[in-house]
Amino acid sequence: MLTCETSCRPLNEEMSGDFMTLMTFVYLVAGLVLLVVGAELLVRGAARLAAAFGISPLVIGLTVVAFGTSAPEMAVSVQSAWAGSGDIAIGNVIGSNIFNVLFILGLSALIVPLIVSRQLIRLDVPVMIGASLLVYVLAYDGELSRLDGALLFSGVLIYTVFLIIKSRREQKDGAGGEFAEEYGLHEQPKPYAWLVNLGLLVGGLALLVVGSNLLVEGAVALARALGLSELVIGLTIIAAGTSLPEVATSIIAAIKGERDIAVGNVVGSNIFNILSVLGLASLVSPTALVVSANAINFDFPVMIAVAIACLPLFFSGYVISRWKGALFFAYYVIYTLHLIVVATNTPGFETFQHAMTWYVLPLTAVTLLGVGIRAWHLQRN
């Protein structure tokens, strides 16, 4: 005779599994929402407090606003490192940097061609490439130690101080005026406004902490449920989710005609992600962050290649045209497909990888080299 204990067990297990899957997505969505809202409150409160202490709008734009859009990456990677999920911490940064350039700049340029400032070519993009190469060298031994983290974090301090000194010397208020208008930095302060702004700052930090906890917990559960590695989840879902502030900032800036800000926001965020986010995550981790072989052999090189690809494309006419945007966007789709194909052992994986390695990537390298040489030749003439 069948009892409910034996006959109902599969049904109970199925219902429990469905409930767990639902809760996983609830955690992911809730975590992303809290991260985006928290980042907005944090940036707004910090920018107004900085203005109240006499810091110029331009300096605020270069530091608080630019770095504030990377607050979700910081919260998630630090929380992941502290919890022992190093693959999510590292995958989040690598994936976010790839997503920022290929997806965000690609989509923004498809909407309207983007202007690239000369400072970006001469300073910020080379710094982004240098930071990408540095972290790759540090991670090549299979881990990021506290010493590595201290070296990376000192880099962002030096970069930030240099930006502040440079901005004061130049005495330009173009981008600063745009940030000042967006965050109300020129408005007459109201009584007890500092208290409200302090509340925004603290509230934003609290939401970032709660949101990062939910997102990391949901991501780990999703990775286990789908049989995917935490690195793949970090490179895709987490990376795209924590980059939502950059998506909003760059696309809105492009639509408004502030096309130099759209590009500068992405490059600045990428520099911050590598030096500050990975640096701090390595410092707070109980043990050295373990870097997987897949990340060393594939994902880090892709991040470096994406950073280097910016130079010839940005340098050619100092404009990211629609065809360049389409190229960036197409490559993000291909990169994501590659991750999915590898993770799921999809039939035809070897054919796909062979086509990428021996046809698509070399063809793109030759194209970029040709664009760079042509742009350099035109600049000389």
Image (tube, grey):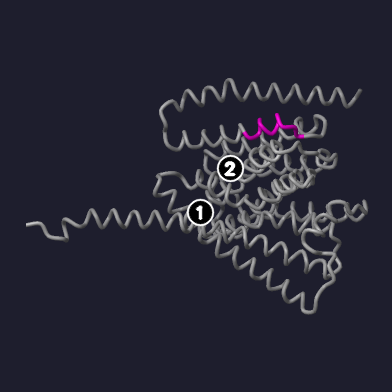
Q: Residues within 10 Å of mark 2 (few under 14, many from 20)?
A: few
Q: Secondary structure at mark 1?
A: loop
Q: Is residue 198 above or below residue 90?
A: below
Residue at (59% x, 65% y) in the render: 207
The image position of residue 141, as x and y in percent, is: 58, 42
Cβ–Cβ below 8 Å for labels 2 and 1?
A: no
Tell me what residue is drawn at x 78 percent, y 67 percent.
Answer: 48
Q: Nearer the viewer, residue 115 or 150?
A: 115
* Nearer-N-terminus badge (2/1): 1
Q: Is residue 289 magenta?
A: no
What amino acid type is highlighted by mark number 1? Ser
Residue designated by label 1: 85
Residue 113 in which image quadrant: top right
Q: Bounds of the magenta span?
A: 320-329
* Magenta-span inclusion, residue 322: yes
Rendered position, 218 above or below 377: below
Whole-number angstrom distance, CA of label 2 to CA of label 1: 18 Å
Q: Nearer the viewer, mark 2 or mark 1?
A: 1
Instruction: Find disc 2 in the rendering and name its residue.
Output: 141
Q: Is residue 129 above or below residue 171?
A: above
User: Residue at position x 45%, y 28% from top?
Assistant: 349
Chief secondary structure of the magenta portion: helix
